[in-house]
Amino acid sequence: MLNMHELNVFVEAAQTENFSVAAHRLYLSQPAVSLQVRNLEKQLGVELFRRHGRNVVLSDAGKVLLPMAQQLLLQAKHIEEAMWGLQGMVIGELSVACSTTVGKYLLPRLIVGFRGQYPEVQVSVDVTCRRDAMDSLLEGSMDIALVSSHMVHRDLEYQPFLEDQVVLVVPCDHPWADGRTIKPENLLECEYILREPTAGSYEVLSEGLADHGLNIADLRVAMTLGNAEAIEMSVEAGLGVAFISRFVASRGAMLGRIAEVPVEGMTLKRLIYMVRHVRRAATPPQQAFWDFAFDPANEEMRHLPVVNNGNREPGTAR
């Protein structure tokens, strides 16, 4: 019979490719990790690692075992959580993959509220790109994903979670920061700080410009940054203007460091979805989080922040 503890040690060692690092993560000594791996190798009759000094790499047998061991450990965890659930307890682990800036701002607040109701659930969040978030959900390494795109797949359930707005922001001393509403053609007058083309906000901007006969390639690009917060700070520093999520813009706008500029006839919105795998039975923590997130009583957690530009409503010209 396989020893689950030895399998867990093997998986950690395989992921870190370093017995010392694995020992640190597992709160074990390095000799204890080596012993557990040797015991597993002896039982299976194969070499799972090739040793190279302090580092190790998986052998061919180890590469075959790793995904099966991960799946077995996951199933063992789900069995425990299901049995606790039968007793009316919500105990266990929950992993959420987040590919959106909105998620980075929203999830902490949502998780705090959730754990206030279910303190025995340990939640981990992985902020990653959309493709990796969906791949992790499909392979079972993540339980729930929060993404800004809808990928058609029979195994996935998408539930609209909130609507994010992408807004134009400028430095507080920019001429457009005086409360005016600009025309779409005025957008060609400035230098921009953009996200990478695979980012959701980039795609929304491209579609919005096309609706007005403009192309994103027509914009004068000062730089491209892969982080929305870095873009907001660059706008504060006067390096250019940008289209970013209103979640990201809210802090700088409230502090008077940047201003939101309405563009006539242009409202850039995107849906943020919460996604789960429907062919795997939801564990009690997964179901509890899903229900909590969509409970009408918690709707305020999904509201977008209101940006106040000089005590006027956004989109009102002076």
Image (tube, rainbow, N blue to C red):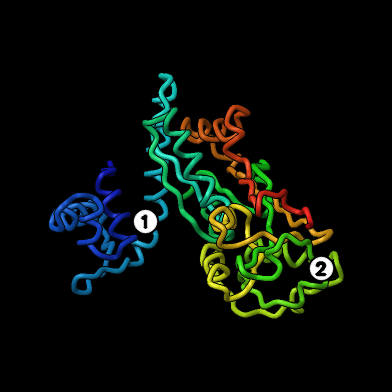
Above-or-below relation of 143 to 217: above
Above-or-below relation of 190 to 114: below
Residue type at mark 1: give it.
Leu
Q: In the rendered image, which quarter contains the N terminus?
A: top left
Viewer-proximal residue among 116 and 154? 116
Query: Within the image, what quadrant is residue 203 found in?
Result: bottom right
Earlier-in-chain disc, 2 versus 1: 1
Q: Residue at x 61, y 40 (%)?
A: 302
In the image: residue 2, left or right of residue 289: left
Q: Residue at x 32, y 66 (%)?
A: 58
Q: Is residue 228 visible?
A: yes
Circle 1 sits on which residue? 65
Q: Is residue 80 visible?
A: no
Viewer-proximal residue among 317 and 236? 317
- Under circle 1, the secondary element is helix
Viewer-proximal residue among 245 and 35? 245
Q: In the rendered image, which quarter contains the C terminus?
A: bottom right
Circle 2 sits on which residue? 184
